Amino acid sequence: MAFVMLFLLTFGLKTTQAQTATYTFSFNNAPINGVIAEIAKKSNYQFIFDAEYLKKAKPVTAKISTNSLKTVLETVFKDQPFDYEINNNTIVLKPSKAFTEEEYILHGMVTDSLGSPLPGASIKLKGTNKYTTSDGNGHFNINLTNEYNTLEIAYVGYLSKTQRLDRTAALKVVTVRLSTNASLLAEVVVNGYQTLSKERSTGAANTVSGKILNENIPVDILSALEGRVAGLAYVKNPNGLGADRPVLRGQATFSFATATRDPLVVIDGLPSETPLEEINPYDIESVTVLKDGAAASIYGSRSANGVIILTTKKGNSPLKISLNTDFFIDTKPSFNSMHYASTADVVDFETDVYNQERARYASTESMFAAYGTVANGSIRYYSPLYQLYRDRDAGKITTDGVNQQLASWKNADYYEQYKENVWQNAFRQRYNLSLSSATAKSNTFASINYDNSKQRVINNNDQKVTLYFKNTYNIKKWLTTTLGFNGAYSTAVATDQSYNSYTGLQPRYASIVNPDGSLVYADYVSLADGITSSGMINGSVAAALKNNPQYRSYRFNILESLNEGQTKSNTVSLRAFANIQAKIMDGLSFSSQFQYETGTTKSEQYYDANSYKMRSAYNALVNYTPATNAYTFGLPTGGRISQLMSQSNTYTFRNQFSFDRSFGKGKHAIAAVAGMEMRQTFLPIGMSDIRYGYDPITLTSTIINNASLSQTGLPSYIFGGNKTIGVAARSFQETKHRNISTFANAAYTYLSRYNVTGSYRVDQADFFGADPEFKNRPLWSVGLGWNASNESFIQNIEWINLLKLRATYGINGNQNTESTKFLTARRVNDNLFPSLQYLNVLGLPNPKLRWEKTETYNVGLDFAFLNNRLSGSIDTYDRKSTDLMVSTELDPTVGTASRVINNGILRNQGIEFTVGADWLKSGDLTLSSQFIYGLNRSKIGQVNKIPSTASNYISSPTLYYEEGTDYNTVYAYRYGGMINGYPYFLDENGKATLDFDANGNPIVSSSRDINNASALVKMGTFIPTYTGSFSQRVSYKNFELSALFVFSGGNVMRKDVTSLNSNDVTDLDITQRYKNGFTPELPRLLVDYSEAMLGRAGSISTMWQNADVNIVKADYIKLRSISLAYNLPKQLIKRLNIPSAKFTAQVNNLWYASAAGDDIDPESYSLNTGIRTLQNPKSFVFGLNLTF
């Protein structure tokens, strides 16, 4: 109940004054609250009083008729435990003298200096054994008396406070604000099951506060965490597609499944399937990363890769409204780092390639006959430059005309035109409005977020609206409920991926627009339709069909095609949650939590009848019979629409008892939880459909014979033979998994110095073997901690503020669903023969299937020195993952040559440093820094795989590995040397792969491949062995300047080496060829190979690109972000009647340096293939934060 009751019962306002009114009442054993309500109604007076007074009030029996309100009050309040006082139209009830000697209830809230609630704060009534803690919203209730009314409030990370509160404080919510203790700031570990002070915790866990998360304007939660947690690294996506993948303390599994290899995401205590990049960063209060076995083992079979816990914001008192407006501008990428040759060099090079190929044939037409034409041979694409020379040789154009065209092409640049006409500065705008409020009974936080992005390629955009609501309500002093939801609706429009790349479609010398802005159309391009099984056409086909009315044009312009085949999608997701918590007795409570997550994604892609791909597909299925001059058409007139829908549903249900009390005047402290948890993930059958002849106006389509068209196809006059089309999938799949778990976790502290912790959990799942040995395998942990700084012999050392040693051992699990305990098979229906049914075996049974297990030893030290000016932590760990699912060679007599079974071992060992320093605090100037460093080596302990070929180790190091090597080892061919531009390599016996004659010419018959993996050289690993960051913060008066540097290294990568087996070359090696010819460092390109050696170019190129001499270091450092913020002066915001206003300007990806040099940015690079991609462009961010 509300502790203060305010009656504003003004039913039927009267114009007469209270003094002249006649009051008539008749009460017979009436409860006091009804009496007060009746008086308030008839008198138009309002009452203010403590509801606790009413609990001890007596029923009223009286008959009253008077015009004196005072007489009424004296009659009904006679012998009651309170007195009254009339102030204007308000009647205030006060405790009577008799009542003042009894207990009164104080309702309070513990917050930090900014008003944020502090859950779990200790509140002790001085001079007694009475003790309580603040709830999840910082609220508390405690009984006081006149004699004992002084509270001692303590919270880890904050300075303790003693405060006396008399009876008058009981008429309102008392807010106790604590000041931070720098040495222990943010030293609270939230593991999702309980909140435990860092002083009492033994595990390796890092907490990043909301203030740090929003120090810079965050793109998302993932980017906000970068450089904030030692040991948390990111696998960068070199193509910029999709989010970066977080990796905590190295790889703990061989699996590639996201749910198996990524850290578990927990939101407000419950596991969630929501991707981190989808979470609104402004809804997050703090992020806790659990890294070792003791910290994370409570999550059992999903914790081997670490746990990332998000704690969402709660309401604060008083009411606060915040508005964040952010604008992100990503500039267009630059081509400078790609080292492209000039268009003129490209044209000259392709001319040389043409002349080399032409020399192999007796005539020009015999050469082009090999490229095929309509109904005559296998059709292969050739470039417009080839067509130009063909026309010259055919007399269709003069030599002068050819030279003029070549000169025009040399001045063109398709890449630059693509950049100017197809790309735009990516622009994102984000608006976030949040509301926060708290009272003694209720706590509410709500937000709405709108995100609108225009991507780099025009016509690509997405929008998203996110809603969040959470309310905690104190039903009784002992009963609290929390209800809430998180919903999101997003839409996206994406162009056909074929058009999103500036390479591949048209040659470098092509144009998109003329100088006057008009479109330039190509007669044909290097692009298959992707709808049928046909390939690309060439100039001969385009010319042959150009004037045939039965066929559609192949004309193409990228700006028109960007409007074709767009995919429109929308996603609806919802996370609803409920929590009820009951305090059973002092220190003991019971909670029940439920969370339900659901998501639906629908997408639709439409090609209209006039789109390039539909025209091309239509032509591919046209058949012509010369004898009858008859045409048949395989595709109906109209467009093509494809639709997809997928869904997911997950629920988690948990019941838990929690105990947290101290005994023996604080000597002993115990915190423990025990409970059970049930969880289900369900992926229902998805829906897919493809229709042809579709008309978006009438919403109709044409029925086609899907079985025939997708299996046997229809005859194609252009390409010859039959061509098929793609249809909707006929097989469906749904996935459902259930888990049930029991768990317990306890922490014991003695004299605030010695800590012992332990946890125990048993997980049972539907996909593990029936053998109880594996089905009920427990996952557990133990930990020890010593708060040395609390020892008397250290407390006297003034420069030591905090010194804590901790050690843990824990066993975590991992769920890998690549194998099951059952025989799995799928029924197959043949499209052509529906009555023919059979089973396709997908996997053999594995009755001994069990969890992947990870055991971790961790030793850590936390410290704070020099009046908390220098603080941090050091951790060293040894993490061994066993029973990993890996493909293992077996005796074929068991029915299969290999199986995925629990047989692999990975071991990660490392050390982590976090050091923070407050260098200067002088008046308005502060200067602080933080350095984070994590070192990790990941070794393969066991795999039992038969050695494979050299090429497999080179191309797929995450699939082919050897015991005792680094995970993702870089294998390379041993370079032997180069003669006359031909490189050679050494096999396992040191023998060269290519011999030369006395004149330095290669002997073709001697050229051979390397297949034996023992010939390879181990050069290191693709995975960084160290990562870290350095952040610097400076504030002066109203200005705040911060910078974040991130670094990574200890790994290697392959250099950007030109293929020697392709004439499709565009980089600077073309220019170097004309300038320098063949040098000892620069091999000859394919165009310069002798005819006899052309057949060996592919093998030589593969070994050259993957040679040991082309391995370089992948270390780099980046200035990830630098930001400048300005807080409006207090005098100004007072005038504006707002509490605060802050402007921020920020630049991301401003600078980098890499050990590889050569303009290589390892983050924008495929480390194994040695292919560079466009570097991440600079991003400019502007933000405004207002509070009301």
Image (cartoon, helix red, strand yellow):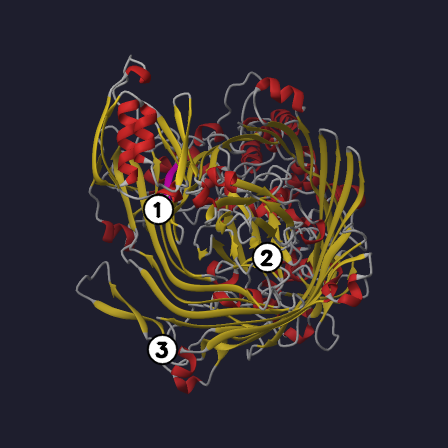
Residue 776 quadrant: bottom left
Q: Earlier in the sequence, mark 1 or mark 3?
A: 1
The correct choice, above or below, for 735 with respect to 145 in the image is below
Tell me the residue at 74%/67% (across/down).
Answer: 791
Q: Position of residue 726 (x, y in %)?
A: 32, 49
Q: Kindly identify the amino acid type of the residue bearing the numbered disc 1.
A: Lys
571 inside magenta stretch: yes
Residue lying at the far top in this picture: please name it: 15
| Range covered by the magenta-colored residues | 566-573
Quickly name the residue at label 2.
127
Near-viewer residue (365 or 1114): 1114
Residue that badge 1 annotates: 55
Q: Quick one: label 3, few (<14), some, or many (20+) residues within 10 Å? A: few
Instruction: From the image, state whether disc 1 or disc 3 is nearer to you.
Output: 1
Horizontal and vertical percent position of residue 794: 79, 64
Q: Is residue 466 magenta?
A: no
On the image, numbered disc 3 is attached to which residue?
Answer: 845
